[in-house]
Image (cartoon, rainbow, N blue to C red):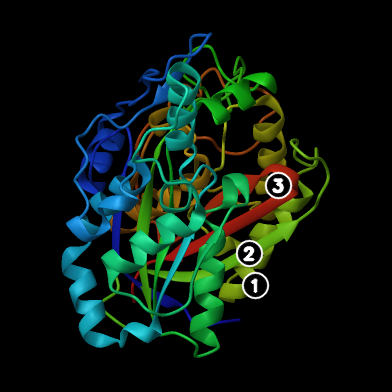
Amino acid sequence: MSRPQPITGVSAINCLGATLDETREALRTGRSGLGICPIELPFEVLVGAIGSPLPELPRALAPWSTRTAQIAQAMILELEAPLQTMRARWRPERIAVLLGTSTAGADVTENAYREFLEQGALPHDYDLFRQHTYGAILHVMCELVGAKGPAWVASTACTSSAKPFATARRLIEADVIDAAVVGGIDTLCGMTLQGFRSLDALSKTRCRPFAADRDGLNIGEGGALLLIEREGDARALLEGVGESSDAYHISGPHPEGDGARLAMERALADAGLDAMAVDHVNAHGTGTRLNDAAESLAITSVLSHAPPVVSTKAYTGHLLGGAGATEAAIAMLAITEGWIPASLGALPLDESIEARVVAERMDGRFRHVLSNSFAFGGNNVSVLLGAAR
């Protein structure tokens, strides 16, 4: 069991809006941000595309300018006040940047290769190392944050931005750092859209997690950042993180939800809490038949008291590498705002789903909330957040 760590700041950007406040308002009113895909594809698909204008990078970082980097800049600007406090409290060598992404700069490389096919040459300003790689966005983030501590990127598909929560906890507990900027970013690109279509996993309409007629997921873009510190003015607490890897199948979950169950149990053990303490679950809830069924089994096996369950992917789409952090930020809203959003499109509920999926917005007192993220290869993470004490 580890000590809970204060979460002192949070920001988010996605198809619902350019800030966490705009995301919160859309969730409160039940407004989905899914719409027509801005990328030219040989098939029609709904996606969660960011429609807000993105800020330019500082001049010194202009060679690293990409959509991914601009999304990072937007989130950093939203965190300006708590970041200033963090920098005043801790030395830069004791501040980490821990990120997740699955696409990195793939959208830039796709556009550059398209120009190569059409014009016979790559764009003159295209730079593979400064625009495509994981190290590129890591460099931009470290410069924008002013951090000089440990810095790395996890790329574990749909758990990419949930894994850094565990890393932050371990580094703080080991006295390697005092604070971390944790989160993730993904952008829309042809690679992921074509890939999920090849798996027959894309819905032809807005996804309907846990519904009887669910037929797949929608892809989104964006991300979230959370500031985790050894001490500070907490908006909420990072109480525990559970990880597992069941390695059941490269793209399908264990049918009994074994890996998901183990991740939730380990998050509770890390926090030193009984399962009965959990007031709400922000589910991974992709809208695919196998994932939702396996997750429901896992939730009911661990949380027999049936806390309310919501998937928010019908609002934002599946942000892949940005999903874990985004949904942790949304889970925080339940704690700080005293309500959870409706699980859009969940009715009529699949009769085999035993988890208590909430199809209408619910008010309540949510002191401890689990946020689930499950990925290809059986990589599973469950993040347990709690109310500031």
Query: In terms of secondary structure, where does tag 1 sit?
Result: helix
**Relative to 137, 55 lies left or right:** left
Looking at numbered disc 1 in the image, what kind of residue is underneath it? Ala
Q: Kindly indicate whether the residue at mark 1 contacts the one at mark 3 (C-beta within 8 angstroms).
A: no
At a point 70% along the width and 52% down the height, the residue shown is 379
Q: Nearer the viewer, mark 3 or mark 2?
A: 2
What residue does disc 3 label?
298
**Relative to 349, 239 lies left or right:** left
Q: Kindly indicate whether the residue at mark 2 contacts the one at mark 1 (C-beta within 8 angstroms).
A: yes
Tell me which label, 3 or 2, sits earlier in the chain: 2
Position of residue 98 relative to residue 248, above or below, is: below
Query: In terms of secondary structure, where does tag 2 sit?
Result: strand
What residue does disc 1 label?
269
Distance, label 3 to label 1, CA atoms, is: 16 Å
Looking at numbered disc 3 in the image, what kind of residue is underneath it? Ala
Residue 239 appears in the picture as rendered: yes
Dot 1: few (<14), some (14–19), or many (≥20) neighbours within 10 Å?
some
Point out residue 22 in the picture as x, y percentages from the top left corner: 21, 40
Tell me which label, 1 or 2, sits earlier in the chain: 2
In the rendered image, the quadrant that contains the N terminus is: bottom right
Position of residue 272 relative to residue 122, above or below, is: below
Dot 2: few (<14), some (14–19), or many (≥20) neighbours within 10 Å?
many
